Image (spheres, grey):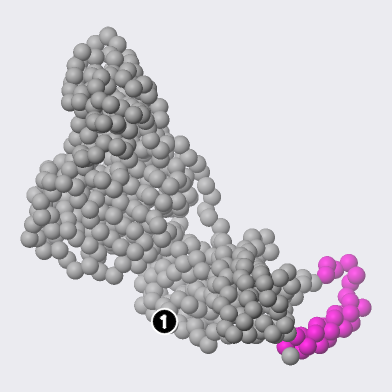
Amino acid sequence: MERRELIALVGGIALLGGTVALLRDESAPPPPPVFERFLADGVEHVPDAHEPGAPTDLELTALDRTSLRASWTATGGLGHGGFEVRWNGGTRLVQGTETELTDLDVNADVAVEVRAVDGLGNRSGPATATAVPRLAHDAAPEDGLFEPVDRFDGPESLSPRRWRVLPATMPYDTRGASTDCLGRRPFNGGRLEVACDLLELQSNVPLALGEPHPGDGAVGRAVLTTDGPLTSDGEVSIALLPEPFQDLAALGDSLPPGAVVLRVTSTAVRFDVGAGVPATGGVVPAAGTFTLPSSGVRHRWELRVLPDAVVALRDGVALAGAPVAVPWRVAHPRLVFRESRGTLLDSFGTGGVPAGPRPASVVALGRSRVDLGIATPAQLAGGTSVRVVATLFAGSGPPATLEFGSLSAPATPMPPEDAWSHETVVYADFPLEESDELRSVRLPTGNIGYLAGAHLVVADGLDARRPLPRVTDRPSPAPEVPAPTVTVVREGDVARVVVELADPTAREVAAVKGVEVDFDGERIATLPTNGSAGGRHEFALRLDDVPTGGHDVVARVLPVDGRGEVRRAQHSFQIRPL
């Protein structure tokens, strides 16, 4: 049996170790413990017969002059565990088929090698490629974008003149910005990171449509560079919202009239449009292949507006389209991130007709059923118009009007709804003239069950009322040990225990030293994996002498670096009498 052979081997090692101890300096530290393969009686390791084949089609591209994106094709699938990437003295383990190398010398030759790694640490031969970041960067896709392109490298990049950071919860807080929703990672000088479940960035710079571009026919475009979405339930969207909806709160599944939204999830790319966007006979390009991006690897998403269609492209390849004609000439872009913690934001730009920012100030109001609050002259100073926005749960019917000082205007719902039994946003616009008077804001009619909150949007108001958003500096993410999942399948008198170490979206995984498996608190297997990047490991456990009832299997994943975290997973199952 393998166990008896192991005992004999350990005995031999112990004897040899004793001999060496007589010869060495007594002050020398003891050698580190050896991580040996071990299988208990009645346990068999089912090896993976797949041998890692060298990756193919290694390609190096660049979205800027100091980075390279390496992408390749896996031979035989990804079940073998992952890949080892080497470049100019650096080494990285990943489980996906792409990675991005940052902070490179713009003029240096960068030689990249990629090897497949199986679950036991065996390496394939390399795929190789060499590039100079400056020469690999293709600036042509940026020619149609207006300067300045927004580079999200710190809080200053979200200047209140150009952006409003919408909070993760409603209503607006007093600053008009959410807290703890943004971090900063030091890639290529800095990139913003989404740190909450919902983040929306509303651009104050309108997207104005122009004449068809001679190259691709676009009359307007919005381009976002990001690495998201990263999770199975994550979503990244580029929304084009026409007047007057750009100042309203979080964008839900119900879209305002005229809206066009490009939604990117982990499985699909699609367009959603609001009411009043007419269908056309426009030709939509055939969709290309969509793959889930990897953490830290940027891609260039473009929402391209054509006279008779809208098209979504990633890195210049069309992935989705809708044969519709937008019913407006000016829209306001909004970036939406849902369940997208960890997503990095790199840049955003628009093309069409140049337009300047139209900043606005947000003034929080109260929660009374009727008197929403008082607006002071200082809060309204410099403004040209004001919008009153109220978020409420209505009863039998919507409010008919909103009042601002001596003025009254119809309360318009956004979006229009047939039923008013749930949370609804209503608004009304008023002209604004200089005055030293206080102005009351009222919701005088309608059966309101509960007012969630209200605020004013003051067009051309003072930017000082909206300070820069809070951004927390964060170090470069350290490699993480892939977390295990454990499943147990009974086949007669044998239980098949499967331990999988999978994290395909991680920017970098830590080298795995080995896997330990316990059954009801007793060690049944120790499997060295020799610096693997993950993988699948199966053990067959005979149940001849195992009693009926409940049992627990615990798997631990140990990193090569002893300072790293040991990851653990447990699976409970029942053995019932036959």
How far across and how far down the image is residue 168, in percent? Answer: 40, 40
- Secondary structure predominantly adopted by residues drawn in magenta: helix
In the image, what residue occupies the spot 43% across and 47% down?
197
Pick out the residue farthest to the front.
578
Residue that numbered label 1 is attached to? 75
How far across and how far down the image is residue 255, in percent? Answer: 23, 45
Q: Quadrant of the N terminus?
A: bottom right
**15 relative to 199 in the view: left or right:** right
Q: Is residue 359 above or below residue 549?
A: above
How far across and how far down the image is residue 274, in percent? Answer: 19, 47
Pick out the residue farthest to the right.
22
Q: Quadrant of the C terminus?
A: bottom right
**87 relative to 516 in the view: left or right:** left
Q: Quadrant of residue 362?
A: top left
**510 relative to 507 in the view: left or right:** right
Foreground of the two, 448 or 473: 448
Disc 1 element? loop
Q: Which residues are magenta?
A: 2-30
